[in-house]
Image (tube, coloured by chain):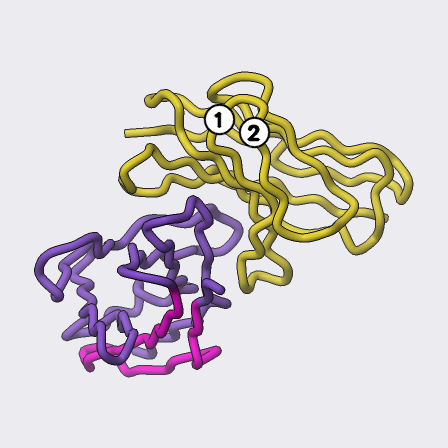
Amino acid sequence: AQSVAQPEDQVNVAEGNPLTVKCTYSVSGNPYLFWYVQYPNRGLQFLLKYITGDNLVKGSYGFEAEFNKSQTSFHLKKPSALVSDSALYFCAVRGRATDKLIFGTGTRLQVFP
Amino acid sequence: SQTIHQWPATLVQPVGSPLSLECTVEGTSNPNLYWYRQAAGRGLQLLFYSVGIGQISSEVPQNLSASRPQDRQFILSSKKLLLSDSGFYLCASVRGGWDTIYFGEGSWLTVV
């Protein structure tokens, strides 16, 4: 079965420090992987995706993520956090033989001044 | 890029009343369409998805149904709402080949 795990409900980081939001997945075959951000009472906004190729993917707002096939992970990272990065972050996965798109439970990122 | 329209944006309905949430897509054709429910600002639960007109896959047994009468229209319905149907409903669209997924702005449903 296809699944996504975001093990941390909340991540707290000081402004200017690096941040990591964790995501692991389970899917048959090679995955399509995505990160989305959600601000209060809004729809989700796309940050980045891994389809194929380079394992390090760069996305919007200075975020990047690394696909690690052996660890089945796709952690979201940013070298220097901003207070405006505070939001709810979702990881999503789809197997290449299915149309089903599954999201994780979300991680709330709080960046303190 | 695609634009997803959802309406109504907010809805307060009594228990036992019917529901119709509509999603329409601009800027693409023959997309895969999805309905998700988000409770209490947390995880997204996949409810239904559709790969074409009249084709609906249901993920969770529930009080809801979905229909796709046109290529870029996806409707979420219920004949009789339950309190547990309250939540934030999101429609999503993606072209085949796994382009970026686009989301609507969501519909808040409160069942009272």
Q: Is A25 colored magenta in this rendering? A: yes
Give the residue pinned by disc 1. Answer: B52
User: Does A42 sit left or right of A95 as displayed?
Assistant: right
Chain letter, colour yellow: B
Q: Are marks 1 and 2 in contact (CB under 8 Å)?
A: yes
Q: Which residues are magenta?
A: A4-27
Q: Which mark is residue A40?
A: none
Q: Classify A24 as above or below B5.
A: below
Residue A108 as seen in the image, left or right of residue A62? right
Q: Secondary structure at mark 1?
A: strand
Q: Is residue B110 left or right of residue A13?
A: right
Q: Which residue is mark 2?
A: B55
Q: Residue at x 22, y 72 (%)?
A: A69
Q: For the view shown, which residue lies furthest in the right direction?
A: B16
- Colour of chain A, in one word, is purple
In 3D space, how far apart are the residues under numbered discs 1 and 2 (Cα atoms)? 5 Å
Chain at numbered mark 2 = B
Q: How far across and down, in percent of the image, does residue B11 sit?
A: 72, 37
Left or right position of B46 against B109 = left
